[in-house]
């Protein structure tokens, strides 16, 4: 296997809606003084000076003044500048929006996409984030994609599954070369601004699963090239212990970046740390109780009609990056990525012969096995959905609609309305009717009322949103959808 590239550490400060242009200039002066003093100490000690890549994301109104101050102080090569969000539209009559071309022309290197506060307060759907990723890349900048679960999500067993779904949706328009330029920031939403940092094993496990997921969808070389940051109550006091973890490439810093001294210390801790990269931890912090064993995965207990459906989907869905992303997420949800080990691969995929060395040398083993085993993965996913064991997925039809790469955005929205309505209708029927009313009659009135309630929303609530809040299951008892 070829040597994997060394990923340069990156520390990014997100100022959010803080610091006007005058305060930004003073911040730069204070940071510069701290940095000069540190470099002097490093030079006097004879230690090698290996700076991380450093970026600042000021408010829009401070971008130009900050860039000017960087030039005046000769720090343009030490600090890069980025934006906190961007429009998904190239130009036009969109009052208040800022285009990717405007940011690129100004000199921005990075653009934050999908931050939890954008998801919550504005809010935007996952298709919009996917388009933003595309326009950022097309204008020569690097997107920093924010993903992460809420506390409610963790408590209800969603865990890293939630973040991986956000990642899958946002990079659905990327090819392999595009993905190399994407920066992923894992930020547990419940940790942002609270001072509560997850256990180090949990962070390390999440980062490893994110990298494994990229491997599963795009291949090992791409996974080795993508930088993954951690964000959420990062401070000088905890930066050193976090940056030493496997698979981490730096930080997305919020509140601590407003203080130039604190931010400088985080950057210096990152530079000073001896980080071993590209290693996978032996254990995982997130465990989903709904996952199948290897034996269950190979032969899930589902009716023959569902097996036929799985075979049809495996045959008819075209080989696209978005479909591969859906398969990778389904593989993670059903059995995890335990088959990264050759022994597990041989146990899981019956078609693999005993020549384990040939498999081990294939850098894209996981990606290729998932594609070759797509029918089994679809069967396993169907079995889990019908056990009501996949958070946020209420019916097989909903999952197929969400995954179908042949659908346009509007077609997907329209069909998701029908899928949610049908699923809720069946649950309501089993709970409420006790057989006293014919199902077809009940369905006619229920769907008419359900869909009329959505008539004025233009399907917005049915778009794949990835909003950072936990959406509970319907309150009706679990029943298999027919």
Image (tube, rainbow, N blue to C red):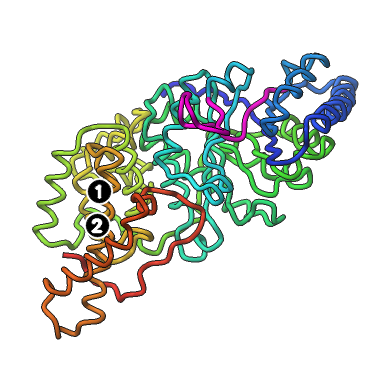
User: Is 159 left or right of 185, judged from the image as shown?
Assistant: left
Q: Earlier in the sequence, mark 2 or mark 1?
A: 1
The correct choice, above or below, for 236 with respect to 225 in the image is below
Mark 1: which secondary structure?
Answer: helix
Can residue 382 be seen here? The reply is yes
Magenta stretch: give its range: 79-99
Q: Estimate the spatial distance between the alpha carbons at disc 2 and disc 1, rounded to whole Å.
A: 8 Å
The answer to whether 408 appears left or right of 248 in the picture is left
Residue 91 image offset from top left, x and y in percent: 48, 24
Please tell me which residue is depicted at 61% across the width and 35% down the height of the picture.
84
- Residue 87 drawn in magenta: yes
Q: Mark on residue 401?
A: 1
- Residue 80 is situated, as x and y percent measured from the top left of the image, at 68, 23
Measured as percent of width and height from the top left, residue 153 is found at 49, 60
The location of residue 329, given as percent across then percent down, is 35, 46
Tell me if mark 2 has few (under 14), some (14-19) or many (20+) residues whose alpha carbon lies within 10 angstroms of its own: many
Quarter assignment of residue 481: bottom left
Q: Where does label 2 land, which residue?
A: 419
Q: Is residue 147 magenta?
A: no
Towards the viewer: 243 or 427: 427
Residue at the spot 26% in from the left edge and 74% down from the top edge: 428
Residue at 37 percent across and 31 percent down: it is 173
Q: Nearer the viewer, residue 400 or 236?
A: 400
Asked whether the beta carbons under mark 2 and mark 1 sit within 8 Å of each other, the answer is yes
Q: Quadrant of the C terminus?
A: bottom left
Q: Name the dominant secondary structure of the magenta segment.
A: loop
């Amino acid at each position: 296997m070829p040597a994997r590239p060394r990923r340069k550490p990156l520390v990014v400060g997100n100022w959010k809606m803080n610091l006007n242009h005058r305060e930004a200039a003073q911040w730069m002066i204070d940071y510069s003084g701290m940095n000069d003093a540190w470099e002097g100490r490093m030079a006097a000690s004879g230690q090698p000076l290996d700076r991380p890549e450093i970026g600042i994301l000021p408010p829009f109104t401070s971008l130009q003044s900050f860039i000017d101050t960087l030039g005046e102080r000769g720090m343009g090569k030490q600090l890069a500048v980025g934006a906190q969000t961007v429009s998904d539209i190239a130009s036009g009559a969109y009052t208040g929006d800022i285009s990717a071309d405007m940011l690129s022309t100004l000199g921005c290197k990075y653009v934050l996409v999908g931050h939890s506060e954008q998801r919550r307060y504005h809010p935007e759907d996952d298709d919009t984030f996917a388009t933003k990723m595309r326009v950022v890349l097309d204008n020569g900048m690097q997107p920093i994609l924010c993903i992460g679960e809420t506390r409610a999500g963790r408590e209800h067993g969603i865990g890293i599954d939630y973040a991986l779904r956000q990642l899958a949706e946002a990079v659905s328009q990327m090819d392999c070369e595009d993905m190399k330029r994407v920066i992923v920031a894992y930020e547990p939403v419940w940790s942002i601004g609270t001072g509560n940092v997850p256990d180090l094993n949990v962070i390390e496990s999440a980062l490893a699963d994110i990298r494994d997921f990229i491997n599963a969808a795009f291949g090992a070389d791409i996974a080795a090239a993508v930088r993954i940051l951690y964000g959420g109550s990062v401070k000088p006091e905890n930066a050193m212990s976090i940056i030493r973890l496997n698979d981490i490439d730096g930080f997305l810093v919020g509140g601590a970046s407003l203080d130039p001294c604190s931010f400088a210390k985080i950057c210096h801790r990152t530079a000073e740390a001896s980080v071993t990269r590209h290693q996978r931890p032996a254990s995982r912090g997130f465990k989903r109780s709904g996952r199948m064993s290897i034996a269950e995965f190979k032969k899930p207990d589902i009716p023959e009609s569902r097996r036929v459906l799985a075979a049809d989907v495996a045959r008819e869905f075209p080989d696209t990056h978005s479909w591969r992303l859906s398969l990778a997420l389904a593989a993670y949800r059903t059995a995890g990525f335990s088959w990264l080990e050759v022994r597990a691969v041989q146990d899981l995929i019956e078609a693999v012969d005993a020549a384990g060395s040939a498999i081990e040398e294939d850098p894209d083993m996981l990606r290729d096995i998932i594609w070759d085993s797509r029918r089994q993965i679809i069967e396993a996913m169907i079995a889990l959905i019908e056990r009501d064991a996949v958070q946020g997925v209420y019916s097989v039809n909903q999952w197929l609609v969400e995954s179908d790469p042949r659908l346009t955005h509007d077609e997907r929205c329209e069909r998701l309305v029908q899928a949610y309505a049908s699923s809720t209708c069946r649950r309501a029927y089993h709970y409420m009717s006790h057989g006293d009313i014919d199902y077809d009659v009940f369905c006619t009135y229920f769907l008419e009322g359900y869909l009329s309630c959505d008539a004025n929303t233009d399907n917005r609530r049915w778009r794949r949103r990835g909003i950072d809040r936990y959406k509970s299951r319907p309150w009706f008892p679990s029943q298999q959808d027919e």
